[in-house]
Image (cartoon, helix red, strand yellow):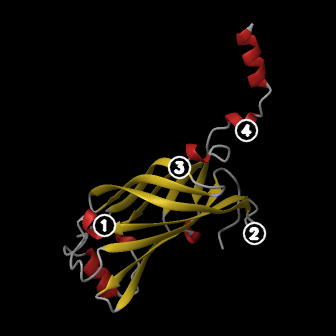
Amino acid sequence: MKTFAYAAALATLPLAAFAAPEEWTLDPSHSQVVFNYNHLGFSTTYGMFSGFDGTIMFDAEDPANSSVEVAFPVRSMLTGWEERFQHFMSDDFFGAEEGDMVTFSSTGIEVTGENTANITGDLTMNGVTQEVVLDATMTQQMDHPMENAPWVGFNASTTLLRSDFEVGMFAPYVSDEVEVFISIEAQKAGSDSAEAQ
């Protein structure tokens, strides 16, 4: 009898309570990773990765049950100065060849507020994998006004040590600490949309 009553109670719960995470694909035209570091105390120097792919498995009912996977080529780095790019790709830093990737795979999510969470994951770069924590905020979830499709946006930040990934040349004169800021948009997988603006 108790088993029957329990089953009946479950049947009355909203279906959303049992919904699995839904797949969202990153919009490469509006997803960026921006990094900066201190250069000899004189300036703050910036770089960026953009146009990359990734997948978010987003559980709106239980955000802690979500996950994220992102990957992009090391050589897609944008520095605004060709000589700096070539130096970063040299053996002084990445020694990067075509096909070398930066990847991030989440391993856990701690919800910290209505729209905020700490996302823990494995960051692999230069052949080294380190655990990092992203301080993330969901900026908006709604139908995109131009794409006519479900859309979601997130911002996140973290601080990395170059030396943790064996790219610490010239530290501490060029700061070992690198501040990283991430802003992404994602479209619900399977939804139709117009070409990104």
Say whether disc 3 or disc 4 marks the residue closer to the N-terminus.
4
Q: Is residue 67 above or below residue 148?
A: above
Element type where label 1 sits in the image: loop
Instruction: Answer few, some or many: residues within 10 Å of disc 2's Cα (few below 14, many 20 plus, some between 14 and 19).
Output: few
Element type where label 2 sits in the image: loop
The label shown at residue 13 is none
Marks 3 and 4 sit apart, C-alpha to C-alpha, by 21 Å
Marks 4 and 1 sit apart, C-alpha to C-alpha, by 44 Å
The residue lying toward the viewer, choosing from 3 and 25, is 3
Q: Quadrant of residue 81?
A: bottom left
The residue lying toward the viewer, choosing from 11 and 31, is 11
Say whether disc 1 or disc 3 marks the residue closer to the N-terminus.
1
Is 80 situated left or right of 41 in this image? right
Identity of the amino acid at label 3? Glu
Element type where label 4 sits in the image: helix
Residue 102: x %, y % from top left: 37, 61
Residue hosting label 1: 98
Residue hosting label 3: 110
Front position among marks 2 and 3: 3
Tag 4 and tag 1, C-beta contact below 8 Å: no
Q: What residue is drawn where x is 61% and y is 43%?
A: 21
Marks 2 and 3 sit apart, C-alpha to C-alpha, by 32 Å
Say whether disc 1 or disc 2 marks the residue closer to the N-terminus.
1
Say whether disc 2 or disc 3 marks the residue closer to the N-terminus.
3
Identity of the amino acid at label 4? Ala
Quadrant position of the N terminus in the picture: top right
Residue 156: x %, y % from top left: 52, 65
Residue hosting label 2: 146
Tag 3 and tag 4, C-beta contact below 8 Å: no
Residue hosting label 4: 16
Element type where label 3 sits in the image: strand
